[in-house]
Image (spheres, rainbow, N blue to C red):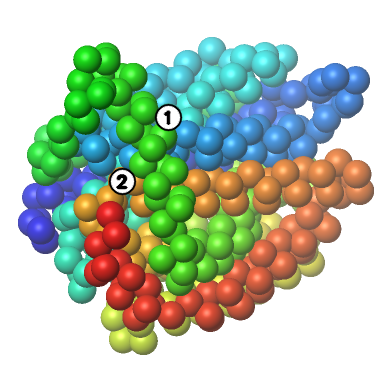
């Protein structure tokens, strides 16, 4: 525990996969999807004509829903089998493969883009279940906020560097003799290769404790996949029944699910909001995202320090107040300068809220069932990621404007803040020490 090489290897996965998130999910693909993939008049599905903004929101929601169904099951299997690292490898390389194939999506390839994006998202969020579950095993409780913040800082740096390279490629496309669409597709492929390539450091330095348990007698004669699947479902059911003993942990998960809904929606819809609602130039959107990426480094480290002085819970509550201000400001903004200013604030908020949410949860869960509990964390994480983009898409679809969609997100931050205030951290830690698992 607290081994420097282990922590470095763990943090490097954030460095690796953040390139995919920043370049493909947040920046390039939404803009390319709206400008080139989806026709200007929209895309018809089942008799309903959908705009690029609405369709993007539904895509984010569907991929989150899929992982929501399987996250705790996979986490339980990984805890029992001692295969967390192998699951991480499988989801990492599967997701990066589908993300690379997005290179072949051109104008009008709506269904191909949807399928490949959803599959790459499943690989990304599925891998993060197992990545996050290593945190309580590599960092002591007093170091957890800092290590979590370090992981996000590595992510913001790695993602920011790769995105800067992609931005340079896109802005100089004419001078190197390629179209803007070709530059965008190359940028997405590069981010996927970056994800797969730098993950090698994680797989080299991150060690998994050999904690595999013996199969029960009645399952020894069954194929391992079937046996582990049965155990996975049983453990999820057991965890669900016993979660009543973790009342404050459950309360935090509900608060997290609600406020994270707002955060994930702002992150996933920011580019397409700026493109379609504000009519901003692609360069403005890309530069703002680059600003967010590097400001987030400071945000993660800053709030890691603040948490050490005023406790994690209160530092996290401060970030939610700031997020509330973000969506109010976003509702009224109209210019590129205002979008740049908003990017700075979002960077600070994002760095702090993401790193503290992960470490705060890690401090309250039983270490022996970390993958299973991070599976539930991912359930609430991805369950929240379903509703925010869905609500955003529906409001945008029925009103014809995304401004009401963005201001509606303040409800998620306020309700999450109120629930978080009632979480008793000490009681949550007492329940963890009872070793119910």
Q: Quick check: marks 2 and 1 in contact, CB under 8 Å?
A: no
Q: Position of residue 332 (x, y in %)?
A: 79, 67
> Reading the chain from its start, which is encountered first: label 2 or label 1?
1
Asked if residue 317 lies left or right of residue 59, the reply is left
Give the residue drawn at x 77%, y 62%: 408
Can you say which quadrant of the picture contains the N terminus? bottom left
Q: Position of residue 342 (x, y in %)?
A: 61, 65
Image quarter for residue 261?
bottom right
Element type where label 1 sits in the image: helix
From the viewer's side, name the closer residue of 429 and 300: 429
Say if 238 sits above or below 63 in the image: below
Label 2 crowd bin: few (<14), some (14–19), many (20+), radius 10 Å = many
Image quarter for residue 266?
bottom right
Say if 185 sits above or below 245 in the image: above
Q: Position of residue 12 (x, y in %)?
A: 24, 45
Which residue in the rendered view is the most extreme toward the bottom? 310
Say if 311 sits above or below 252 in the image: below
**Label of residue 123 in the image:** 1
Label 1 crowd bin: few (<14), some (14–19), many (20+), radius 10 Å = many
Nearer mark to the viewer, of 2 and 1? 2
Q: How far apart are the alpha carbons under marks 2 and 1?
A: 16 Å
Residue 302 visible? no
From the viewer's side, name the closer residue of 345 and 290: 345
Can you say which quadrant of the picture contains the C terminus? bottom left
Give the residue drawn at x 77%, y 37%: 54
Give the residue drawn at x 13%, y 41%: 211
Give the residue drawn at x 42%, y 29%: 123
Residue 113 visible? yes
Give the tally of numbered discs. 2
Asked if residue 183 lies left or right of residue 373, the reply is right
Element type where label 2 sits in the image: helix
Badge 2 is on which residue?
A: 371
């Amino acid at each position: 525990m607290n081994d420097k090489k282990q922590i470095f290897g763990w943090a490097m996965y954030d460095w690796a996969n953040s390139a995919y998130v920043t370049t493909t999910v947040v920046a390039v693909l939404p803009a390319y999807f709206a400008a080139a993939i989806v026709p200007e008049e929209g895309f018809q599905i089942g008799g309903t004509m959908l705009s690029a903004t609405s369709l993007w929101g539904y895509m984010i929601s569907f991929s989150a829903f899929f992982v929501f169904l399987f996250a705790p099951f996979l986490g339980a299997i990984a805890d029992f089998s001692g295969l967390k690292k192998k699951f991480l490898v499988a989801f990492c390389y599967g997701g990066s493969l589908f993300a690379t194939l997005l290179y072949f999506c051109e104008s009008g390839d709506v269904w191909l883009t949807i399928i490949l994006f959803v599959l790459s998202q499943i690989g990304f969020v599925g891998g993060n279940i197992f990545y996050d579950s290593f945190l309580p095993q590599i960092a002591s409780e007093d170091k957890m906020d800092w290590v979590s913040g370090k992981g996000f800082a590595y992510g913001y740096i790695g993602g920011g560097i790769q995105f800067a390279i992609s931005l340079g490629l896109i802005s100089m496309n004419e001078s190197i003799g390629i179209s803007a669409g070709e530059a965008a597709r190359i940028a997405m492929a590069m981010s996927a290769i970056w994800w797969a390539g730098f993950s090698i450091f994680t797989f080299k330095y991150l060690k998994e404790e050999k904690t595999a348990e013996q199969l029960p007698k009645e399952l020894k004669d069954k194929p391992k996949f079937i046996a582990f699947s049965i155990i996975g479902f049983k453990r999820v059911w057991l965890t669900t029944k016993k979660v009543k003993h973790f009342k404050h942990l459950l309360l935090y998960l509900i608060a997290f699910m609600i406020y994270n809904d707002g955060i994930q929606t702002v992150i996933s819809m920011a580019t397409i909001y700026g493109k379609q609602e504000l009519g901003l130039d692609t360069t403005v959107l890309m530069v703002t995202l680059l600003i967010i990426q590097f400001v987030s480094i400071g945000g993660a480290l800053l709030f890691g320090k603040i948490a050490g002085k005023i406790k994690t819970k209160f530092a996290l509550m401060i970030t939610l107040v700031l997020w509330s201000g973000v969506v109010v400001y976003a509702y009224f903004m109209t210019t590129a300068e205002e979008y740049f200013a908003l990017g700075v604030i979002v960077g600070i908020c994002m760095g702090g809220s993401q790193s503290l949410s992960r470490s705060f949860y890690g401090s309250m869960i039983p270490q022996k069932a970390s993958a299973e509990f991070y599976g539930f964390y991912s359930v609430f994480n991805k369950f929240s990621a379903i509703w925010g983009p869905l609500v955003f898409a529906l409001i945008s679809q029925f009103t014809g404007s995304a401004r009401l969609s963005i201001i509606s997100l303040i409800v998620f931050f306020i309700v999450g803040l109120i629930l978080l205030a009632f979480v008793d951290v000490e009681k949550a830690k007492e329940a963890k020490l009872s070793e119910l698992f």
